[in-house]
Image (tube, rainbow, N blue to C red):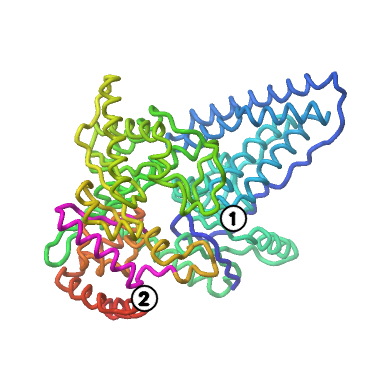
Amino acid sequence: MKILMGIPVSGGVALAQFFIYTEDIPLDIPRFRIQEETVQAEWSRFCSAVETARVELEDARNDSLKENREILDAHLLMLEDPVFHKQVRSRLETELLNIECVVSDVSREITQKLITSPVEYFRERAVDIADVARRILHILLSLKKASLADLAEDVVVIARDILPSDMLAMNKERVKGIALDAGSKTSHTAILAKAFGIPAVMGLSRVTREALNRQKAEKAGENSELVFVNGETGEVVFDLNEKIAIYKTFVRNFRNYRQTMELMANLPAETLDGCRITLNANIEIPYEAEQALSYGAEGIGLYRSEFLFLTSGQPAEEEAQFSAYCTVINAMKGKPVTIRTVDIGGDKIFPNMGGAVEKNPLLGARAIRFSLAFPEIFKTQLRAILRAGVFGDVRIMFPMVSCAVELERALSFLEEAKHQCRKKGHPFAENIPVGCMIEIPAAAEIADILAEKAAFFSIGTNDLIQYSLAVDRNNELVNYLAQPFHPGVLRFIKKTIDAAHCAGIKAAMCGELAGDASATALLLGMGLDEFSMTASSIPRIKKIIRTVSMKDCRILAERVRQCKSAQEVKNVLEEHKA
């Protein structure tokens, strides 16, 4: 077998013949010089193409599901970006080249600059800019755009990348899986794959080349082959040969497992000795709220609001935020929704804000620090959340709090936002609960102090591990050191939980560890009140909770407390599982 490993971005498994999508192959762009007197005519052609593209996008937006409109809105903003237009006009006048060539050159330079950026946000936006530019070029060249809408059989789509507009148009009934050379979990293509429930693996580097080689061999006389995509683990497997039957059984068993897990949705997360535990979902964009309910979420424990800011690259307007928050609140039908204020900075850089590039962005002006540095942006978000709070059970959560002063300043801005709502005559939630995330070691150490002002805690284990162990999880040389079961990390978690309980507030966890089945019994024994995770993980964690007792979990936690290394903790957990 030939196994390629990539980034799992949309769960599930698929087994089907592969279909190589080559729409992203560079267009054959004509290149010739023009006369000065024809510059205006070429510019008019560009403006006309932009207008046609705008109409196409607006038509697609009107025909699209609400959850996909935000991506098309971003494309509309990019299409009409004055900086892009200015660059095209300037290049047209100085180089005197045909408009197709100018648009191609300008867009390529922009995307190349973004692709080589160390910031993941910029890299992912390169795909959207390429999508918009390609749309304009198709119009200028009078080309018919290839489509995935006409697929006649079930396939796994293999490509270097798939533009978001192509994802929206494709035949979703026929596309059983997706495998791409490029992309990551935060790309619009990944978000759409999750929205459509299509198993997807990205960042494979050479899957297109592998498929093209096999396609050539097939034309030379070999039979067409099936490819297996595992959106849970990131595997893409060719050359199944005599193991095809095994993989077909695996796919069938996985679907049966999914159905069994779905039956857990309506059962309570309750231990054998009657202790009820709250299981919430983490979401990034509004459409995920309904998915969360289908998996049995009892609320939204973490609504990451960055999508509202990063999609357009502009400060999100109050009404747009208000609408997005209300969409989630209404979908949750009275269940609690915890909205984290924007966690911009670090690996999610907010463009157009000026200032110097930070040498160590993960230690810089990110999360609550960013919000406190830009109070008008912060108060706009707080007003939107306060107003949305009228329509349901809403909580606010501040990220990356490191000291009591930051929490107090954030709370003072919240009071200012309330005053502004009163002044404008906007109804709002007066007594909205406000908590903070514990994701910095110093915050865990002073959790008792923070608990005097916070209505709840939520432990962000991803950053807590990173900052506790001084490990960059994205650095292949050291990411093996990012051990969630390191005794130091576990002590910070326990200290936070105990401080919360001493103050009479709840301790939740919204980091990846909350959805790690091997950690569930341990976290129960440590006293964690609420778990918040990717919605699809909820049934699995619920099943574990329903098979253990709190008494046994506390004994397990005491055993783990005496361990001296991460490996020793893992051994104890494995022994308990057995």
In the image, residue 129 lies at what x, y percent? 62, 39
What residue range appears in magenta?
A: 482-511
- Which residue is more in the foreground, 178 or 149? 178
- Which residue is more in the foreground, 317 or 206? 317
Q: Within the image, what quadrant is residue 224 found in?
A: bottom right
In the image: residue 131, left or right of residue 413:
right
Q: Residues within 10 Å of mark 2 (few under 14, many from 20)?
A: some
User: Which element carries disc 2, helix, strand or loop?
Assistant: helix
Note whether residue 16 is visible. Answer: yes
Q: Which mark is residue 566?
A: 2
The answer to whether 325 is drawn above or below residue 542 in the figure is above
At x 24%, y 25%, the residue is 427
- Outermost residue on the front side: it is 405
Say what amino acid the circle numbered 1 marks. Answer: Leu
Say what amino acid the circle numbered 2 marks. Answer: Ala
Q: Within the image, what quadrant is residue 51 found in?
A: top right
Task: Name the mark nearer the viewer: 2 or 1.
Answer: 2
In the image, residue 243 lies at what x, y percent? 53, 74
Whether residue 488 appears in magenta in the rendering, the answer is yes
User: Which element carries disc 1, helix, strand or loop?
Assistant: strand
Which residue carries the number 1 mark? 180
- Which residue is more in the foreground, 132 or 513? 513
In the image: residue 150, left or right of residue 303:
right
In the image, residue 216 lies at what x, y percent? 73, 61
The answer to whether 319 is drawn above or below residue 70 in the figure is above
In the image, residue 204 lies at what x, y percent? 59, 60
Whether residue 139 appears in magenta in the rendering, the answer is no
At x 68%, y 26%, the residue is 49
At x 82%, y 36%, the residue is 30
Q: Residues within 10 Å of mark 1 (few under 14, many from 20)?
A: many
